[in-house]
Amino acid sequence: MKVDVLLGLQWGDEGKGKIVDVLTPQYDIIARFQGGPNAGHTLEFDGRKHVLHTIPSGIFREGKLNLIGNGVVIDPVTLQREIGEVEEHGVQVDARMLISRKAHLILPTHRLLDAANEQDKGKDKIGSTLRGIGPTYMDKTGRNGLRVGDIFLPDFKERYDRLVKKHARLLSNFSEFSYDLSEHEPAWFASIERLRQIPVVDSEQWINDQLDAGKRVLAEGAQGTLLDIDFGTYPFVTSSTTTAAGACTGLGVAPTRIGEVIGIFKAYCTRVGSGPFPTELHGDTGEALRKAGHEFGATTGRPRRCGWLDLPALKHACMLNGATQLCMMKADVLDSFEEVQVCTHYEVDGERSDHLPYLLEESLVNPIFEPREGWPGAGQSGSGTELPASLMNYVQEIESLTKTRISIVSMGPDRAQTHEMAS
Ligand code: GDP
Ligand code: IMO
Ligand code: MG
């Protein structure tokens, strides 16, 4: 069997959580492959809303296994809280979830370093989620990190102390930044005890064995392609590989074992945090989109910046990921517009370009928009409803530009508000 990959094609928050939940019945295992509690994946069903940060979005479906892969960074405190929230709904998480021994741990000092770095950057800050993501991946590649497997070693505490000592030295360089580690350590060590109760595995071996045994696996990405450490709008990116390649390194599956690559995008664009966003709307229209789409971060509650669909960026993201099918999300949100705009290309140095340039800064890139007929009043709708012809035209334009089929159009946050498109 092969691993199908589901990932974001924009700046995150495309609706990955919803679609993973919708697709889970077709799979045996859902495996998160990168990111950490910077993610906020929202699922809605039976009139309830759930936000997951580290736990894979297949957790609510009975009989399925959920893996937190080696590419993920785990804050045990957040994870413990999240497990508690899911268990309130009668789900026994330990029976449905496994964690890779090789996943790295976020320490309290990683969060402090994230905060100190951001404070130090001032107006140039990344706008990170302050979850310690960057510093944890830095320790991973710097070969200093602590991994889940280490919590079972007799010298775990010494390893922890050694790393914290390094962090304290780094933090002492930020004269403006004060902290009290003793406020954070007791909760962290308590959550490590909880972590010990969750089954851990050598997940690269486990997942390949599962594939050999005929199990169907869906790899769940976090963030989005334009936040990728290599291909995103650097330096305003996250610290992991959010593109399809990340599923290979973040789970230990070979490229030859990847099957479908399902790319998710909104019918418009959003971004939270700093960094360039060519199609951003600064005035009333942006505000209207934010309101209609409830565009506030699922992790930090920050307002998301909103703008029209950026076709060159979408095409680029499809190329980088080798997307084999697409899901278009939140088309219902645009239903108050008689006419919508799409960015068909950019002007860079006065020349037409439909490629993504090295820098996407507003001063260098002029997005060129064209109007498209809207689908006013379409509203949220379930699978049995016919979609308006103008929306179908929008779908077909994107399919022909990206040369990729749109298999799902989502018309509302609920599981049931999902239109599967005939192939
Ligand atoms: P993720 O990080 O990619 O999982 O996305 P988020 O959960 O951060 O953000 C997506 C938001 O849009 C959540 O509040 C979802 O409940 C909501 N959502 C998902 N699909 C749709 C849709 O088709 N229409 C509407 N109106 N909301 C949606
Ligand atoms: P999901 O999985 C949207 C953004 C942050 C910031 C940048 C770096 O829900 O789509 P980090 O904390 O990773 O160092 O922040 O990346 N960011 C996200 N934006 N959705 C996310 O996750 C994000 N995770 C990180 O806002 O701009
Ligand atoms: Mg999100």
Image (spheres, rainbow, N blue to C red):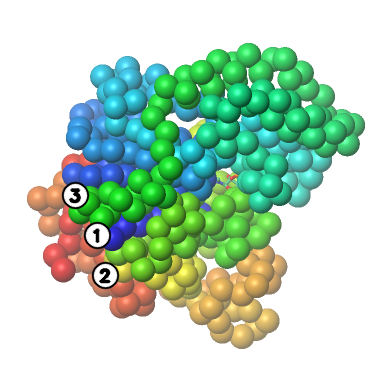
| Residue 288 vertical placement versus 343 (above, below) | above
Image location (x, y in percent) of residue 134:
65, 44
Q: Earlier in the sequence, mark 3 or mark 1?
A: 1
**What amino acid is found at the position of numbered circle 2 in the picture?**
Arg
- Residue at position x 65%, y 60% in the image: 234
Q: Are marks 2 and 3 in contact (CB under 8 Å)?
A: no
Quadrant where the image shows the C terminus: bottom left
Q: Which residue carries the number 2 mark? A: 405
Extreme-front residue of the structure: 154
Q: The disc labelled 3 sits on which kind of residue?
A: Gln
For the residue pair 362 and 219, the one nearer the viewer reads as 219
- Say what amino acid the circle numbered 1 marks: Met
Inspect this view and state whether residue 299 appears: yes
Pick the residue in front: 376 or 133.
Answer: 133
Looking at the image, tell me whether mark 1 or mark 2 is earlier in sequence order: 1
Report helix, strand or loop for mark 2: strand
Q: Which residue is mark 3?
A: 26
Dot 3 lies on which element?
A: helix
Q: Mark 2 vs ligand 1: CB under 8 Å?
A: no
168 w.r.t. 308: above or below: above
Of badges 3 and 1, the one in the foreground is 1
View extreme (left): residue: 384
Seen from this angle, which residue lies furthest bottom?
351
Residue 231 coordinates in the image, percent (x, y): 57, 65
What residue would you read off at disc 1? 1
Q: Residue at x 64, y 30 (%)?
A: 107
Residue 283 circle label = none
Q: From mark 1 to mark 2, how far is it between C-alphas?
A: 22 Å
Q: Tell me residue 313's x, y (percent).
A: 49, 68
Disc 1 under 8 Å from ligand 1? The reply is no
Residue at the image position 71 percent from the left and 49 percent from the top:
142
